[in-house]
């Protein structure tokens, strides 16, 4: 992947371009390798400062706490996280399961296998409030592995920066 240019006077556009390009690269890598490593991309006001791999089976709560601590301790501008996740796709406007997940009454891991969806995941959040999530459905059909439809969510408060 050719790294996008970073413009310190337009950090918001720069981080969005990084997220879009990393999403394209994550799709390419997944389709080639049939898997994707869990990675954190860290950015300061001046641009990218690091890529950190996350060990397999690391608890998501530990990851989020480490991100919050890194943001605070290093005055980060933005974080992009890429990897594979199990997720839940809304099944209607008054989906009771979605309410339980959002309220923290249950986790995706508590769901039946047929209610969970495996996805390639990219999440970006910046200090100025920009946030973006890409969820690409992973499709497994016997020996074939591919990507299905993609859901993009913008503007969700992901709390890496909001809780500091």
Image (cartoon, helix red, strand yellow):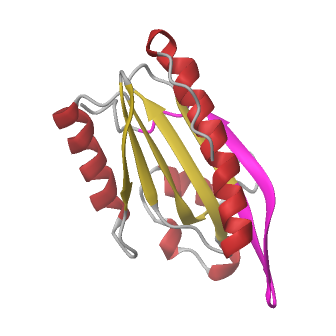
- Vertical placement of 62 versus 130: above or below? below
Task: Say which residue appears at 64% left-offset and 81% top-offset.
Answer: 113
Q: Could you tell whether 96 is left or right of 125 in the image?
A: right
Task: Say which residue appears at 64% left-offset and 71% top-offset.
Answer: 116
Q: Nearest the camera: 6 or 24?
A: 6
**Does 78 appear in magenta?**
no
Q: Could you tell whether 96 is left or right of 77 in the image?
A: right
Q: Main secondary structure of the magenta part?
A: strand
At which x and y percent is residue 58?
A: 34, 70
At which x and y percent is residue 50?
A: 35, 45
Of all residues shown, which one is farthest toward the bottom?
142
Instruction: Report the number of numbered marks.
Output: 0
Task: Say which residue appears at 33% left-offset and 51% top-offset.
Answer: 64
Q: Nearest the camera: 96 or 159?
A: 159
Of all residues shown, which one is farthest toward the top?
9
- Vertical placement of 153 versus 99: above or below? above
Q: Nearest the camera: 101 or 117?
A: 117
Extent of the magenta region: 136-158
At which x and y percent is residue 81?
A: 47, 50
**Does 139 appear in magenta?**
yes
Of all residues shown, which one is farthest toward the front?
2
Quadrant where the C terminus sits is top left
Q: Could you tell whether 49 is left or right of 9 in the image?
A: left
At which x and y percent is residue 90?
A: 70, 54
Image quadrant in which you'd find residue 147: bottom right
- Vertical placement of 9 versus 11: above or below? above
- Vertical placement of 91 versus 58: above or below? above
Image quadrant in which you'd find residue 120: bottom right
Task: Say which residue appears at 81% left-offset and 90% top-offset.
Answer: 142
């Amino acid at each position: 992947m050719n790294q996008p240019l970073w413009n310190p006077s337009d950090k918001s556009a720069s981080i969005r371009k990084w997220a879009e390009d990393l999403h394209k690269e994550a799709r390419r890598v997944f389709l080639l390798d049939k898997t994707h490593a869990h990675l954190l991309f860290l950015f300061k006001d001046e641009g990218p400062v690091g890529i950190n791999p996350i060990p397999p089976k690391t608890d998501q709560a530990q990851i989020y706490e480490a991100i919050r601590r890194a943001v605070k301790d290093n005055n980060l501008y933005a974080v992009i996280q890429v990897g594979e996740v199990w997720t839940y796709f809304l099944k209607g406007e008054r989906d009771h399961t979605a309410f339980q997940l959002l309220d923290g009454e249950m986790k995706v891991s508590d769901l039946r296998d047929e209610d969970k969806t495996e996805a390639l995941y990219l999440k970006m959040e910046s200090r100025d409030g920009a946030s973006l999530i890409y969820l690409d459905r992973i499709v497994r059909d016997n020996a074939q592995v591919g990507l299905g439809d993609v859901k993009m969510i913008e503007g969700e408060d992901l709390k890496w920066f909001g809780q500091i």
